[in-house]
Amino acid sequence: MPGIADERVDNRVVDALSAEILTKLAYSLGAAVLILAGRVLVLRYVGSRIEDPDAAYRARKIVNYVATVLLLVVLAIIWIDAFQNLPTFLGLLSAGIAIALADVLKNMAGWFFILARRPFQVGDRVEVSDLIGDVVDVRLFRFSLMEVGGWVDAEQST
């Protein structure tokens, strides 16, 4: 009969783990709903208060980035149980990220430079290599140009 006792212990462990996972899922869902609802409310407020299109665009971008980072931090706190060893975890994590994602970190530094120093902004006409275009969007890993010239002789979008 030792097999029956072992099976009861295993079932209790599985039940406890299932309850813990369901609790974490519920907290994660609740956090996501609250943060995304807050994001929508802030975007509505920003849309109704800011009339300048450039300022409204920058405000929407900032709100989206803040909501994303906040959601990731909250989900990490919910799911990672090792936060009592947070300094060790962050040290190992940052070393691994620096090695594995060097190019991505360089892109992020370039994006920060574009936001901070403003060598160009949305609406400016820029030339990159042999392409000329109007900047239509600046994102974390890329910026988008609406190409002008090239196929037509005028300065119209192509």
Image (cartoon, rainbow, N blue to C red):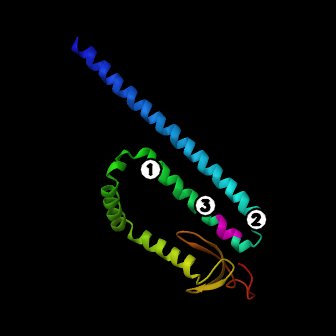
For label 1, the SS is helix
Which residue shows up at 63% across the image and 85% down it? 126
**Residue 22 percent across, percent down from the top left:** 47, 34
Q: Amino acid at mark 1?
A: Ala
Tally of numbered tags: 3
Image quadrant of residue 94?
Answer: bottom left
Figure check: 43 above or below 156: above
Label 1 – label 3 distance at C-alpha? 18 Å
Q: Nearer the viewer, residue 44 or 110?
A: 44
Label 1 – label 2 distance at C-alpha? 33 Å
Which residue shows up at 31% across the image and 24% down it? 10
Could you tell which of marks 3 and 2 lies nearer the N-terminus?
2
Q: Amino acid at mark 3?
A: Asn
**Which residue position is annotated with label 2?**
49
Closer to us: mark 3 or mark 2?
2
Closer to us: mark 1 or mark 2?
2
Could you tell which of marks 1 and 3 lies nearer the N-terminus?
3
For label 3, the SS is helix
Q: Label 3 neighbourhood size at 10 Å, few (<14), some (14-19), many (20+)?
A: some
Q: Residue placed farthest to the left in the image?
A: 2
**Residue 92 percent across, percent down from the top left:** 31, 59
Could you tell which of marks 1 and 2 lies nearer the N-terminus?
2
Q: Label 2 neighbourhood size at 10 Å, few (<14), some (14-19), many (20+)?
A: few
Which numbered circle lies on residue 124?
none
Q: Nearer the viewer, residue 136 or 118?
A: 118
Q: Which residues are magenta?
A: 56-60
Q: Label 1 neighbourhood size at 10 Å, few (<14), some (14-19), many (20+)?
A: few
Q: Amino acid at mark 2?
A: Arg
Which residue shows up at 65% across the image and 70% down it? 58
Which numbered circle lies on residue 76?
1
**Which residue position is annotated with label 3?**
64
